[in-house]
Image: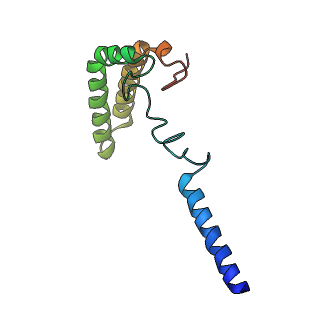
Amino acid sequence: MKTILAIIAVVSLLVVGTMAFAHGTGGWGSGHMGQGYGGHMGQGYGKGGGPGAGADQEFLDKTVDMRKALHDKKFEYRELARKPETTNKEMRKLEKEIFDIQENIREIAPRSAYSGYGPCWGK
């Protein structure tokens, strides 16, 4: 009888431990997706889009060329980084160009539309 109770206790602990590990910190339903399922899908998903959805679209429209240039510069940077003959001067030049494009995008970003959600760049 004691053996059966011990086995049940061990199995119960394993089941509870596995369930707790699977759900992570924060209790039931608040794993990587947030409170309940889909809790942290972010703004712009689903109907309505939440506060600032129009500003987000305007931002994306205004920055399409800059975002494409940023993508191209990052690709160029990775290609230079993998070549052994690349100099530090070339890498620093591309890093500065990437930083400048990112700063230009941040200048246009609608800070007030997020009101605590999404990216936060302090200035």
9 on left or right of 70: right
x then y, percent, for residue 30 = 55, 44
Q: Is residue 5 above or below residue 97?
A: below
Q: Quadrant of residue 11?
A: bottom right
Q: Position of residue 44 (x, y in %)?
A: 38, 25
Instruction: Report x, y in % for residue 42.
Output: 44, 30
**What is the tally of numbered marks visible in this picture?**
0
Placement of the N terminus among the 4 image quadrants: bottom right
Coloring basis for residues: rainbow
Q: Is residue 100 left or right of residue 75?
A: right
**Residue situated in front as seen by the camera: 2 or 20:** 2
Q: Quadrant of the C terminus?
A: top right
Left or right: 114 with respect to 85? right
Give residue 41's quadrant in the image.
top left
Q: Where 70 falls versus 13 (above or below)?
A: above
- Which residue does the image show at 33% across and 32% down from the upper left? 90
Tell me if residue 79 comes above or below residue 11 in the rendering: above
